Image (cartoon, rainbow, N blue to C red):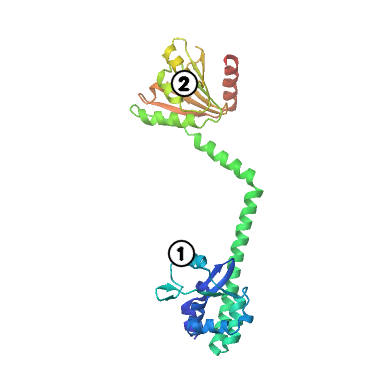
Amino acid sequence: MNEIVEELKIEKMIYEVRGKQVMLDSDLAKLYQVETKRINEAVKNNLEKFPERFSWKLTDEEVKGFLVKNFDRKIERRGGRYKEPRVFTEQGVAMLATILKSKIATEVSIRIMDAFVAMRKYIGNNLIEQRYINHLVIEHEDKIKLLENSFEKLETKKNEIYFNGQIYDAYSKILNILSEAKEEIIIIDGYADKSVLDMIRNTKVKVILIIKNCGNLKEQDILKYQEQYNNLHLIYDTSFHDRYIILDKKIFYHCGASLNHAGSKTFSINTLEDEMVKNSLLEKLAKIT
């Protein structure tokens, strides 16, 4: 008897329907070693002992959902159609055992009660763990966001070197940098040309481009660009030798080559982390922007 019950694994026969843990009449029949119709006859002859909170027949929708969820393993098939299965809650199983009145029913019912208790404990523990996790997330939401921002900064603060010939890799890196901006991009590149306009045209933020008067960017290019995109503020200044990309006045990149020549020769893109250097650069920009 015990071997039969162990082999059938009662916990795997307990399902959730309408928010309650239940067992199918066909599974109970296997455990009690009777036909399924015997189970249903017991209920039919004692309807007053089986209110709906103890036992009920699944609706067509519940049957379909059950079949989808449990791969058609548990519903009996008669004449090509699924017979309406009946399910029993823990109280329904206990009541059924008193009606069947057999040694097997008594022994199996005890095992079933133990299985229901075990399932409740398992579900309860998991709910407690999930609630604890949810509580931690809510309680420490600000700290989690701070950590996420720190990780994002670590990801962006990578110094990279590109060798001659890595034209697309360098171009792609610059586009990725520009896409990080939330409000404003400042590009300092005395020799910027039309290719830089191609890089910034898909950005959704304000772009300040600082170039030399004798730069490679033609006035006609600028006029045509502004007619369509109108996100560019151009400043002529000859006091910068190096190239910089500044995002939202917070993230600073130093670029060893003009953006339009990136990858044609070996150069590097580095982040500036020294706050004094960044503040000095911002003070300089404040005077010309």
- Secondary structure at badge 1 equals helix
Residue at left 38%, top 31%? Answer: 169
Q: Position of residue 235 (x, y in %)?
A: 52, 14
Residue 228 numbered tag: 2
Residue 36 position within the rendered picture, expressed as x and y whole percent measured from the top left:
49, 81
Question: Is 54 above or below relative to 251?
Answer: below
Q: Position of residue 173 (x, y in %)?
A: 43, 31
Q: Which residue is mark 1?
A: 68
Which disc number belongs to residue 89? none
| Residue that protrudes farthest toward the right in the picture | 139
Closer-to-camera residue (50/238): 50
Identity, as a three-letter code, of the amino acid under mark 1: Val
Query: Toward which corner of the image does residue 126 lie, by quadrant?
Result: bottom right
Q: Quadrant of residue 115?
A: bottom right
Q: Is residue 203 above or below residue 30?
A: above
Q: Is residue 72 left or right of residue 89?
A: left
Specify the farthest residue to the left: 165
Q: CA distance from mark 2 to mark 1?
A: 54 Å
- Neighbour tally class for label 2: few under 14, some 14-19, many 20 plus, Cα within 10 Å: few
Q: Quadrant of the C terminus?
A: top right
The local secondary structure at tag 2 comes to helix
For residue 91, side relative to residue 224 (left or right):
right
Rate crowding at label 1 as few (under 14), some (14 to 19) or many (20 or more) other CA atoms within 10 Å: few
Residue at 48 percent of width and 31 percent of height: 179
Type of amino acid at the residue the image marks with label 2: Gln
Question: Which is more toward the observer, 174 or 44?
Answer: 44
Q: Nearer the viewer, residue 240 or 181?
A: 181
User: Residue 57, relative to residue 231: is it above or below?
Assistant: below
Please say whether residue 70 is visible from this viewpoint.
yes
